[in-house]
Image (cartoon, rainbow, N blue to C red):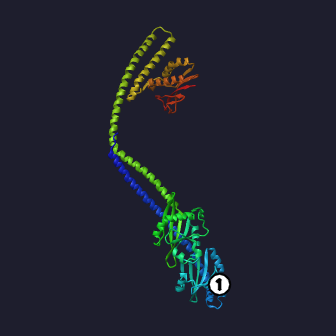
Amino acid sequence: MKINRKSIYYSILVFIILEIALDFNIYYNRETNINSAIVTQIDYIEKNYDASIASYRSLSLSIFDSIINNDEILELVYNINNSSSPNVYRLELYDKLNYIYKIIKFKNFKVFHFHDKEGNSLLRFHKPKKYGDDLKAFRVSIENISTDHNYIEGFEEGRIVNSYRFIFPLVYKNEYIGSVETSVSIYDLLKEIQNNFDGNVDFLLRNSIVNKIVNDNTAVLYTKTPFDGYSCYVSPDTDENSLRMSDTGQYLFNRSELNKLNNKSSKLFNKEKDLDKPFYKILWEDSKAILVSFIPINNINGKQVAFISYHQRFMGAEKIKNNYFIMFLIGNVIIFILSFLAYFVISSRQMAIEQALAVKLAKDRAEEISRLKSDFLANMSHEIRTPMNGVVGMVEILKNTEISKQQKEYLDIITNSANNLLTVINDILDFSKIESNKITLENIPFSIRKVIDEVGDTVFLKAEKQGINFLTYTDPDMPEFVYGDSIRLRQVVLNFVNNAIKFTAKGKVYVSAEIISRLVVNLVKVPSFRALLNLPKLKELKKVIILIKPT
């Protein structure tokens, strides 16, 4: 077949356009869904952080309102500041509130601290023997509350511990007498967040704070990072290469793996770190999605000084990517099919013309072959039928001579066999008629009993010679005449009987013609062979069954 190049070019163009549209649509929708899932996850992370802070705030407010902010406690603080025996009142204050410290310590509050109005330490419940030192020198929060006497809350850098602080002003008889704070270390806060997060949580602090404020013993816990200007706090109990699992069974990265992930996300961090808003990056490691996100932390003065970084296996992104990969494969299959159909439609006209020509040539050739075959069959059948008619004629002449009864029966058998042979010859001619849809079946009255008897007469000697008992039976209720094609019925029954005798080694062959009142679906059913004929003038639908049964 001659190929139309223009059809191929158009099909390729259709394929390219559809492929570009598919790729763009899948990529856009995939990234949109992944970003939507990330935004949801970042929102969850921020709410998790806010919920942790809110729980500490609620406990601090409850302690201040119900226990500290009353005249008994405030008077003790006042007396520590103004009496000649401050240690007596300091000890009494410690005894009254030490049980509170034990409770909140269990809740991760490591600091329960009273300050005087000048910003000096009044009583540290975690270090009760250390007091009187000036806190304003390195605590901006103490300087602020000593000046404006307002409640302060937020993250604050510390020489030993960086903490999230809740600082309440103390007012006794309308006079500011100092302040009290509860604070939770940022590291304990991160542990709590970690318990509610399936992944790793790290704390990044500005190098300027690590170098200037944090003391030497704590500074060694901050390690260098690929993030410009920031160091990462590493707990002293962290194993560099240990594998860990979260409480929910989620895989946690070890420090070595985190360092590799940080190297890959450092470019984004260095670009986004000063924007004062959360940012994130998806990293793909061996078909695994890892969400790296950074939440900025501002200090009490509102200055960004730290980040909380999150690393987690992001199954949602993996699922979305896999789903869209399947869609991509299905889409390409559809595009391929459409492109093929486009080529098929474009070139179908030319193919139709060529096929029509081929069909016409094949039809002409088949008709010529059929004509030649019909001529051959007609000539051959004529040559055979002429001498056979002579045989039949001579048998009829013999019947009119003086012969015995047994000889007459033999001549009848010869006549029937010759007639059957003539029927076969006629059927040879019918083959050509069948091929040309010209065959017709007769519908004339005939006797089934006679057909069965004639078949029996024809094959009786053959069965007897083979040592097989041959029996026939016709239902006594069988009508004298039925309508149909007796010649073809005789041919069918004769063929069945001959086969039954041929394949029966011993025993008997039984041919019966019976009337039944059920519809027989099978024309032939081994080992029974059935031919169906309509019975005339019966009150109900019945069928004639001619049964040839080898036993």
Residue 1 sits above or below residue 196 on the image: above
In the rendered image, which quarter contains the C terminus? Answer: top right
Residue 420 sits above or below residue 349 on the image: above
In the rendered image, which quarter contains the N terminus? Answer: top left
- Residue 527 position, x and y percent, is 54, 28
Quarter residue 507 falls in:
top right
Q: Secondary structure at mark 1?
A: helix
Residue 198 in view of the camera: no
Residue 104 sits above or below residue 80 on the image: above
Left or right of 351 in this view: 209: right
Disc 1 target residue: 93
User: The disc labelled 1 sits on which kind of residue?
Assistant: Leu
Q: Which of the pair 475/19 is nearer the observer?
A: 19
Crowding near the residue tagged with mark 1, few <14, some 14–19, many ≥20 C-alpha atoms within 10 Å: many
- Residue 54 position, x and y percent, is 55, 74
Numbered disc total: 1
Q: Which of the pair 13/151 is nearer the observer?
A: 13
| Residue pictured at 41% horizontal, 48% vertical | 337
